[in-house]
Image: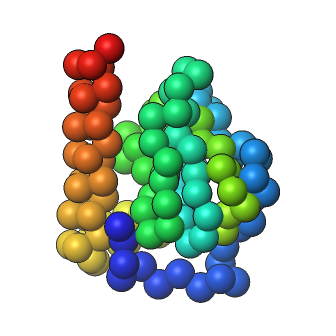
Amino acid sequence: MIDPLPIHHSETESFAAGQIIFKAGEPGTLMYVIAEGEVEIVVGNQVVEIARPGTIVGEMALIDQSPRSATAVARTDCKLAPIDQRRFEFMVQQTPFFSLTVMKIMADRLRKTNSLLASA
């Protein structure tokens, strides 16, 4: 969970339940902090995570400038705070806690993926 991010609802984008936020294979220019609602992270046809308020989605594309590795779909009506490359880099440089939080989220996702693969 990312608590210290200043999210102002005037800075959020709204997505309706079922709406695609981004698709696997697309270039990624934004990551999102979930302010309200739930987002499904889908790889292939499998939901691998349900992201909830306070967490992030789409961060990998900003880190390595590669195409999206997953599709994000609004599970419920959502409000998401977009973070572009410039703001992301500023937050990484100026806020060590933000960087650690992003790494913890990515490590948690990798562990969950490893567990899914081991049980398959």
The N terminus - image quarter: bottom left
Place of residue 56 in the rendered image (x, y in percent of width and height, measured from the top left): 45, 58
Most extreme residue toward the front, as rendered? 119
User: Residue at position x 71%, y 67% from top?
Assistant: 13
* Residue at 31% across, 26% down: 116
The answer, for residue 85, to whether it is visible in the render is no
On screen, residue 12 versus residue 38, left or right, reads: right
Who's the residue at 47% across and 84% down the image? 6
Depth check: give the residue in front, 11 or 114: 114
Percent x, y for residue 3?
36, 78
Which residue is painted at 24% across and 27% down in the image?
114
Count of marks, rendered view:
0
- Reply above or below: 117 against 87: above
98 vs 57, left or right, is left
Q: In the rendered view, would you say 32 is above or below 96?
A: above
Examine the rendered structure and indicate whether residue 59 appears above or below residue 52.
above
Coordinates of residue 88 in the picture (x, y in percent): 42, 64
Give how far across and how far down residue 55 sits, in percent.
Answer: 43, 62
Q: Which residue is the extreme one toward the top?
A: 120
Residue 112 picture quarter: top left
Q: Left or right of 112: which side holds 88? A: right
Quarter of the view holding residue 110? top left
> 64 or 14: nearer the eye?
14
